[in-house]
């Protein structure tokens, strides 16, 4: 297995948003991978769109572990920003209570979806002094200026430095729309300058005192500071949802470039998941059109009478579309996912019905199967293609059960391993029980009764047709 892992870990291609193309993944430091993903701002419950991003990076994390990489995975928590102040204004107790409440819900949902914990999950409030020091440095370097006790990053000066890619083009954000109304409101030099410190002296809520004013750090400086502190000024992968691409990730990059006096653009590879939409509109907290995972799991949305919507089914639903494509949420498609899930995961039960050949010969090309599965996930984490190839293995197993194909004991064990690797270890799925399985048993029992009646009547043609149907599910031993 070590030889197989070594072979495939050298063939990973990632669509790098920074270069706007697929690139061969080569870690900066041999077998070590450093990955940073922007986590939630916990002022509301996370929605399915957030979960899609966290599940994708969970699979990437699992895959790197499977390939025996030494990976350090950081996913931050924004537990303090301007939105939090507005929501919990003038009530310190309510603020602390709400933060804890939403964090515990977020943590529980990630557990339900079988999302592994990262190596570290730092909170922004634990790095306040580091952020203040970075802001001091930006002011000293004259890439930031003070206005009305707030501090702004000077985009004009940055864009005039020929050593850097211009702001707005780093992550291919060529069409930038600026809000002209903000210029007079905040007294900024330029429309597109962004806040790295916000004056909130009039709020009776958590705040920090600095020489330029009392307030809180801006959103962007938090992630730059944490990633630099824990992973260094240049690391392997930075990821998040596509809605963070601009301005958040571009702002992170330019701050890091100035603070560290380099043009590394913070990370070597940038990965962005596309939006989960509902009625073809972005699912978001701001639009108030989001669907909460608990609402589906607890049956608040009626989908089917046969099966409870298990979190693993939702996880499977969210990974059936490639992460760089939009996924439009549909109850019809979610309902269809139920059958697909049970059909695929039932493959582990089918192994018990195969009687492998004692000899070493086999009609199954195991090397080809390994190639198809690894090559699909190595192609920019093409999970839909991987699922397609895993379903092809399912078809092979059916043929082995029906003696259409022969398989050796050694090859059967190899198939078991690869299915465990990809379905359980990497995709993070598992076998689940549901009412659907019980209904299948009822149907099979009814067919068996009907078949026995046909045999008594000596209608062997009809009874044989029934046998062919149910033999896919159970062993039939006619005396």
Image (tube, rainbow, N blue to C red):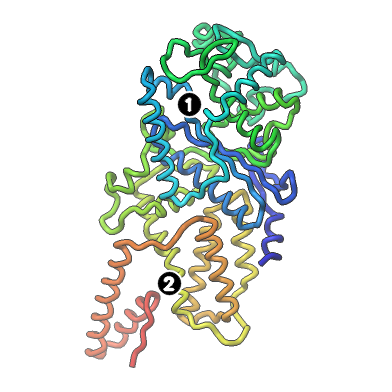
Crowd around label 2: few <14 · some 14–19 · many ≥20 (10 Å): few
Residue at position x 28%, y 59% in the image? 306
The x and y percentages for residue 467 are 34, 81
Dot 2 or dot 1, earlier in sequence: 1
If the image is split into quadrants, where does the N terminus sit? Answer: bottom right
- Give the camera-side residue of 188 and 217: 217
* Residue 157 located left or right of residue 248: right
Q: Give the number of marks.
A: 2
In the rendered view, would you say 431 is above or below 31?
Answer: below
The x and y percentages for residue 263 are 74, 28
Disc 1, SS: loop
Can residue 247 be seen by looking at this rendering?
A: no
Residue at position x 71%, y 61% in the image? 7
In the rendered view, would you say 105 is above or below 141?
Answer: below
The x and y percentages for residue 104 are 40, 40
- Give the camera-side residue of 234 and 205: 205
If the image is split into quadrants, where does the C terminus sit? Answer: bottom left
Can residue 258 be seen by looking at this rendering?
A: yes
Q: Circle 1 sits on which residue?
A: 80
Is there CB contact under 8 Å for labels 2 and 1? no
Crowd around label 1: few <14 · some 14–19 · many ≥20 (10 Å): many
**Residue 162's quadrant in the figure?**
top right
Residue depth check, mark 2 versus mark 1: number of the one nearer the observer: 1
* Residue 29 located left or right of residue 385: right
Mark 2 and mark 1: Cα distance apart in space: 48 Å
Disc 2, SS: helix
Residue at position x 68%, y 15% in the image? 143
Q: Of the numbered discs in the image, which one, if any, rests on residue 235? A: none
Q: Circle 2 sits on which residue?
A: 349
């Amino acid at each position: 297995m070590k030889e197989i892992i070594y072979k495939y870990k050298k063939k990973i291609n990632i669509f790098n948003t920074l270069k706007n193309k697929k690139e061969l993944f080569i870690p900066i430091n041999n077998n070590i991978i450093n990955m940073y993903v922007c986590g939630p701002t916990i002022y509301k419950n996370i929605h399915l769109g957030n979960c899609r991003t966290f599940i994708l990076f969970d699979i990437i994390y699992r895959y790197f572990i499977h390939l025996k990489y030494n990976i350090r995975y950081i996913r931050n928590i924004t537990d303090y920003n301007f939105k939090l102040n507005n929501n919990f204004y003038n009530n310190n107790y309510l603020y602390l209570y709400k933060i804890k409440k939403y964090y515990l819900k977020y943590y529980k949902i990630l557990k339900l979806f079988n999302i592994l914990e990262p190596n570290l999950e730092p909170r922004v409030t634990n790095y306040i002094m580091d952020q203040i020091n970075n802001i001091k440095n930006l002011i000293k370097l004259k890439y930031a200026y003070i206005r009305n006790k707030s501090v702004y990053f000077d985009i004009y000066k940055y864009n005039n430095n020929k050593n850097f890619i211009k702001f707005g083009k780093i992550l291919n954000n060529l069409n930038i729309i600026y809000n002209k109304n903000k210029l007079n409101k905040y007294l900024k030099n330029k429309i597109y300058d962004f806040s790295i410190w916000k004056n909130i002296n009039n709020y009776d809520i958590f705040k920090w005192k600095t020489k330029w004013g009392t307030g809180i750090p801006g959103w962007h400086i938090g992630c730059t500071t944490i990633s630099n502190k824990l992973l260094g000024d240049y690391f392997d992968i930075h990821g998040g949802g596509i809605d963070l691409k601009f301005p958040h990730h571009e702002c992170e990059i330019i701050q890091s470039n100035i603070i560290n006096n380099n043009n590394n653009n913070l990370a070597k590879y940038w990965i962005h998941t596309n939006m989960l939409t509902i009625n073809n509109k972005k699912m978001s907290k701001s639009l108030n059109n989001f669907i909460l995972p608990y609402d589906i799991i607890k049956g608040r949305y009626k989908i089917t009478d046969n099966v409870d919507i298990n979190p693993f089914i939702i996880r499977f639903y969210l990974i059936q579309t490639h992460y760089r494509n939009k996924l439009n949420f549909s109850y019809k498609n979610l309902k269809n996912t139920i059958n697909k899930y049970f059909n695929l995961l039932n493959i582990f039960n089918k192994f018990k019905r195969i009687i492998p050949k004692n000899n070493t010969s086999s009609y199954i090309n195991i090397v080809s199967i390994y190639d198809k599965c690894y090559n699909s996930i190595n192609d920019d984490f093409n999970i839909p293609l991987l699922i397609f190839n895993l379903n092809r293995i399912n078809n092979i197993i059916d043929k082995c059960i029906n003696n259409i194909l022969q398989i050796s004991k050694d090859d059967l064990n190899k198939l078991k391993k690869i299915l465990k690797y990809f379905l359980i270890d990497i995709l993070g799925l598992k076998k689940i029980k549901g009412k659907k399985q019980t209904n299948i048993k009822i149907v099979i029992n009814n067919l068996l009764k009907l078949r026995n009646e046909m045999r008594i009547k000596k209608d062997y043609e009809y009874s044989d047709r029934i046998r062919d149907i149910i033999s896919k599910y159970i062993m039939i031993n006619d005396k």
